[in-house]
Image (spheres, grey):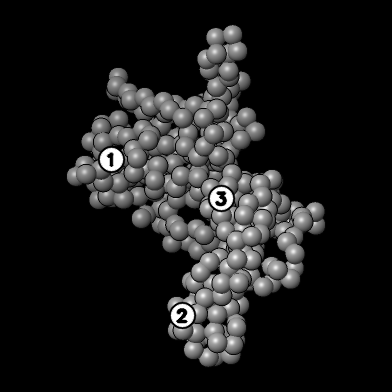
Amino acid sequence: MELDSIECVSSVDGIEEDEIHHHNPHHPLPHHHHQFPTSKTYNATNGILGPTAIAPATSVHELLECPVCTNSMYPPIHQCHNGHTLCFTCKARVHNRCPTCRQELGDIRCLALEKVAESLELPCKYYNLGCPEIFPYYSKLEHETVCNYRPYNCPYAGSECAVVGDIPFLVSHLRDDHKVDMHSGCTFNHRYVKSNPREVENATWMLTVFHWFGQYFCLHFEAFQLGMAPVYMAFLRFMGDEAEARNYSYSLEVGANGRKLIWEGTPRSIRDSHRKVRDSHDGLIIQRNMALFFSGGDRKELKLRVTGRIWKEQQNSDADVCIPNLCS
């Protein structure tokens, strides 16, 4: 997928036009270690620990640590004839040889250790990020896959970025490593530019991040094939959980020559991947011929102006309905 760049300035009081140009995606990013800020250190293997955390009993925790991947072991737990254990996932990786004594593993289960694992109750591994929940050892994994306190994936589109973190960390990562444009304000006016647009079937323009209401929002714009039709799509994602995203709304508008298209919706959480949102068509979709009509001229160059705004929904306690709180 091609990646495009942004040169833009957003305005809160008056809408100024931003221009976003297509560019070559093959610019290397600075080498980045996947870590959280020092106040919240994340270890993808062992979870999150901090100076105030209450860690599990060390001896039991060590017994249940796989010697290969160092993750905690869950039933089925395998062992060799000498009693050395390892997790089910790693058994195939070591070609049925004990990583400790090199003896053949066979299909021996360590039932005693499995019972110990099933009897334990431990805090969620994201407790240092705020999760208060305690679970039986065996069911803890299921919770951690949907825990509201789990780290977020980097929302950058156009490359497969494996960085995870909390929102403040990801904002810094987007600014420093991906060099995205960061703006304060709830209104925007971008012009997306691409020469020879009929030759481009898939393209992603550089992400733009807006800071307003104390929250961060990601504006995406890209070209792709919808069935047999080439289209452009703009949509907004919220840097936070889905429940919080529902407190906000946004609108997008594109038009020229006395015609316009308007989209209004709720931003999707970055818990949903960029591809998932795009494939659900949850945003402003413009067919290429219409986009070139809006671009004017000889229709050989895309110059598509997209304007929009973000607002927060306020709960009206008397009528029990949401009313818009326009940015001001």
Q: Nearer the viewer, mark 2 or mark 3?
A: 2
**Residue 161 x/y as whole percent:** 50, 58
User: What kind of element bears circle 2?
Assistant: loop
Task: Please name the residue that numbered disc 2 is placed on.
Answer: 107
Q: Amino acid at mark 3?
A: His
Q: Amino acid at mark 1?
A: Val
User: What kind of element bears circle 3?
Assistant: helix
48, above or below 111, in the image: above
Task: Please name the residue that numbered disc 1 is placed on.
Answer: 231
Residue sticking out furthest to the top? 318
Q: Residue at x 30, y 34 (%)?
A: 286
> Dot 2: few (<14), some (14–19), or many (≥20) neighbours within 10 Å?
few
Q: Is residue 315 visible?
A: yes
Residue 25: quadrant of the picture: bottom left
Residue 187 is left or right of residue 158, and the answer is right
Q: Residue at x 48, y 71 (%)?
A: 89
Residue 36: quadrant of the picture: bottom right
The circle drawn on residue 143 is 3
Mark sitting earlier along the chain (1/3): 3
User: What kind of element bears circle 1?
Assistant: strand
**Residue 57 x/y as whole percent:** 75, 64
**Residue 29 x/y as whole percent:** 53, 61
Residues at discs 1 and 2 in contact (Cβ within 8 Å): no
248, above or below 316, in the image: below
Give how far apart the Cα atoms at labels 2 and 3 are. Answer: 29 Å
Residue 143 is left or right of residue 38, and the answer is left
> Dot 1: few (<14), some (14–19), or many (≥20) neighbours within 10 Å?
many
Mark sitting earlier along the chain (2/3): 2
